[in-house]
Amino acid sequence: MVKKFYYKTKIYYEDTDAGGIVYYANYLKYFERARTEWIYSFGFDHKKLNKINTFIVVRYCHVDYKKPVRFEDVIEIMSEISKISPVRINLIQSAKVSSETRVEAEVELAIVDSDGKPKKMPEDLYKSFKGCM
């Protein structure tokens, strides 16, 4: 099983401010896309999870902006599990350009039902994530 998950994307003009630097909130979108693609790689998607009243939400996020990313850079988002339980996943995610970390985030995800109450994730998904540790 892959210990880390990687997702690449190019920076487009729409991602940047007037100076050609990625707008700070857009990193949250890149991190979200990487997490979603990771879930897809296990054979799950949010529609499938929602049908069984299971939602994965961000409970906590701390972002450290080290160095800017610019228009037309290609960034690689690395996601790695630091801790997991049936109802929570803690990740370290980073945005890198040419292997240099530009932005890093600590993210805690919670698994909840449609009322926002904690719920165990499906066993297959839990085992898939657990295998990445």
Image: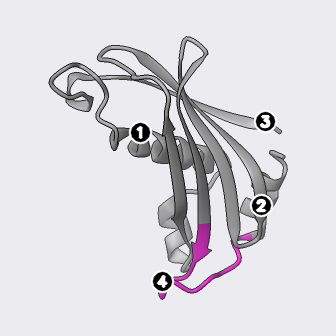
Is residue 117 highlighted in magenta? yes
Label 4, on which residue?
Answer: 114
- How is the model colour-coded? one colour
Q: Amino acid at mark 1?
A: Tyr
Upstream in sequence: badge 1 or badge 4: 1
Q: Is residue 80 left or right of residue 34?
A: right
Q: Amino acid at mark 2?
A: Ile
Q: How far is mark 1 from mark 4, CA to CA?
A: 26 Å
Q: Amino acid at mark 4?
A: Ser
Upstream in sequence: badge 1 or badge 2: 1
State the image coordinates of residue 10 (x, y, percent, origin top left).
38, 21
Q: Nearer the viewer, mark 4 or mark 2?
A: 2
Dot 1 crowding, Cα within 10 Å, few <14, some 14–19, many 20+: many
Which element carries disc 2, helix, strand or loop? Answer: strand
State the image coordinates of residue 17 (x, y, percent, origin top left).
20, 29
Label 3, on which residue?
Answer: 2
Q: Are marks 4 and 2 in contact (CB under 8 Å)?
A: no
Q: Nearer the viewer, mark 1 or mark 3?
A: 1
Report the residue at 68% width, 56% height from top. 90
Label 2, on which residue?
Answer: 84
Q: In the rendered structure, which segment of residues is drawn in magenta?
A: 110-122
Dot 3 crowding, Cα within 10 Å, few <14, some 14–19, many 20+: few
Q: Are marks 1 and 3 in contact (CB under 8 Å)?
A: no
